[in-house]
């Protein structure tokens, strides 16, 4: 059974599609949750502070942690710094992906596994998956969805600009999902892909 890398741009509906794959019986994982755990590791925190400066640290009685808002602000404004941080995090993410995949397939070789990976193509992760799926919608729709989630319009647009163009991602994908409509429309497209790959 193929392992799928699922991506799209900020606010375009990746998490919704991941849940829909899960409803159909796929094993689903959100890479951001892996990153969240990686960012708690003291060795990762120290490397990031070396790259971005001590102002990204929060010092507490029990140790240090990262001010994630400050990290995001710096890396979304500076592509070079973003690449530096990605080099620290991505090898660790790949390790977890491989371990997760082999753990499931050992017990259930017929399993379909879907990983939601925001920077799938930017980070060159696509070669680690059998198939790739891109979820897309118009930028203005993505921005309005993000504003309802609490992002400012400026922040939403800045993050979208920092990502690879969605047209490029669509051209690189094995499957694309148009997420302009309602959930039932998106669900039909997910089901078609699920049936094709299984």
Image: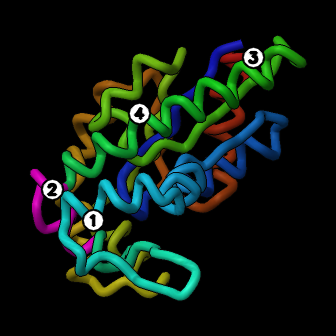
Residues drawn in magenta: 72-81
- What whole-number distance in Å separates the C-alpha atoms at marks 3 and 4? 29 Å
Splitting the image into 4 quarters, where does residue 190 fall? top right
Left/right of residue 196 with respect to residue 50 in the rendered view: right
- Does any portion of residue 180 appear in the rendered image? no
Which of the two discs, 1 and 4, sits closer to the camera? 1
Residue labelled with disc 4:
91
Which of the two discs, 1 and 3, sits closer to the camera? 1
Residue labelled with disc 2:
81
In percent of the image, x 37 and y 66: which residue is there? 142
Residue labelled with disc 3:
198
- What whole-number distance in Å separates the C-alpha atoms at marks 4 and 2? 17 Å
Left/right of residue 191 with respect to residue 71 in the rendered view: right
Q: Is residue 178 above or below residue 26?
A: below
Magenta region, mostly helix, strand or loop? helix
Residue labelled with disc 1:
49
Residue 12: image location, x then y, percent: 43, 58
Q: For label 2, count other residues whose C-alpha is less than 10 Å away and answer few (under 14), some (14-19) or many (20+).
A: some
Which of the two discs, 1 and 2, sits closer to the camera? 1
Q: Earlier in the sequence, mark 4 or mark 2?
A: 2
- What whole-number distance in Å separates the C-alpha atoms at marks 1 and 3? 44 Å
Q: Is residue 149 above or below residue 101?
A: below
């Amino acid at each position: 059974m193929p392992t799928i890398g699922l991506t799209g741009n900020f606010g375009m509906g990746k998490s919704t599609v991941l849940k829909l794959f899960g409803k159909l019986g796929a094993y689903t994982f959100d890479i951001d949750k892996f990153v969240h755990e990686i960012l708690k590791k003291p060795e990762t925190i120290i490397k990031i502070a070396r790259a971005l400066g001590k102002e990204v640290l929060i010092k507490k009685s029990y140790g240090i942690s990262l001010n994630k808002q400050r990290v995001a602000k710096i890396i979304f404004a500076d592509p070079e710094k973003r690449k530096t941080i990605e080099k620290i995090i991505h090898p660790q993410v790949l390790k977890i992906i491989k371990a997760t995949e082999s753990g499931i397939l050992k017990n259930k070789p017929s399993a379909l596994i879907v990983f939601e990976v925001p920077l799938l193509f930017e980070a060159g992760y696509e070669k680690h998956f059998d198939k790739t799926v891109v979820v897309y919608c118009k930028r203005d729709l993505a921005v309005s969805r993000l504003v309802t989630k609490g992002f400012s319009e400026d922040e939403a647009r800045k993050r979208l600009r920092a990502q690879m163009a969605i047209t490029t991602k669509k051209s690189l994908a094995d499957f694309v999902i148009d997420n302009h409509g309602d959930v039932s429309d998106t669900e039909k497209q997910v089901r078609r892909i699920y049936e094709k790959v299984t």
